[in-house]
Image: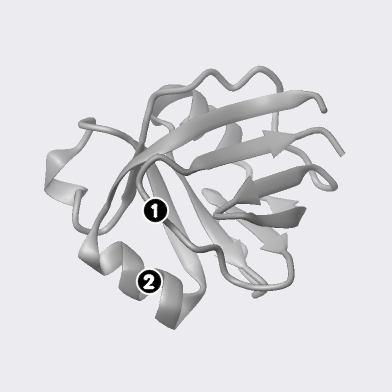
Amino acid sequence: MDIKYDVSITAIGNLAKTFLSDNSSAILLDEGIRPNLSDMVIEHTPGELKEDIKKGDKLLMGGVKYTVEKVGDAVNDNLREEGHCTLVFNATGSMPGQIIVKGPSLPVLSNGAHITFTKK
């Protein structure tokens, strides 16, 4: 398994839980980088993006495996700079900072859980 990006969840904001359940989306951000957004985001350990995320790659998050369907134009730069992107689960989206993924269910989030992108 060729890992492109691997981080661990350090905090899950209350609004982040609502976004996941109501909008099937999760906003990721390096821990401590923007404290004013902590309620809205899933904070994680800083990580190195070793290779751009592309369509067809895999995401393992919350015990669920997903296939990347679409990667917004700003995603890879944002991940490198701030660990930031929005994951959209089993829905459509077209924003520059979004990664659209397909899988069997929404992830179950917990502190310490890994968010891992791998090559197809």
Q: Nearer the viewer, residue 73 or 91?
A: 91
Residue 5 in the image, given as x and y percentages of width and height: 61, 28
Q: Determine the residue positioned at 19% across, 57% down.
A: 39
- For numbered disc 2, what is the local secondary structure? helix
Q: Earlier in the sequence, mark 2 or mark 1?
A: 2
Image quarter of the C terminus: top right
Residue 110's disc number: 1
Please tell me how crowded label 1 is: few (under 14), some (14-19), or many (20+) other residues with Cα within 10 Å.
some
State how many labels appear: 2
Would you say 107 lies left or right of 81 here?
right
Question: In the picture shown, does residue 3 fall above or below 35?
Answer: above
Amino acid type, label 1: Ser
- For numbered disc 1, what is the local secondary structure? loop
Q: Nearer the viewer, residue 78 or 25?
A: 25
Amino acid type, label 2: Phe
Image quarter of the N terminus: top right
Q: Is residue 69 visible?
A: no
Circle nearer the viewer, 2 or 1:
1
Q: CA distance from mark 2 to mark 1?
A: 15 Å
Question: In the picture shown, does residue 106 fall above or below 70?
Answer: below
Please tell me how crowded label 2 is: few (under 14), some (14-19), or many (20+) other residues with Cα within 10 Å.
some
Q: Which colouring convention does the figure follow?
A: one colour
Residue 61 in the image, given as x and y percentages of width and height: 58, 50
Furthest residue toward bottom:
22
Q: Is residue 12 visible?
A: yes
- Image quadrant where residue 69 sits: bottom right
Residue tagged 2:
19
- Image quadrant where residue 103 sits: bottom right
Q: Determine the residue positioned at 48% across, 22% down.
A: 47
Q: Determine the residue positioned at 34% across, 68% down.
A: 17
Q: Nearer the viewer, residue 84 or 95?
A: 84
- Image quadrant where residue 43 sits: top left
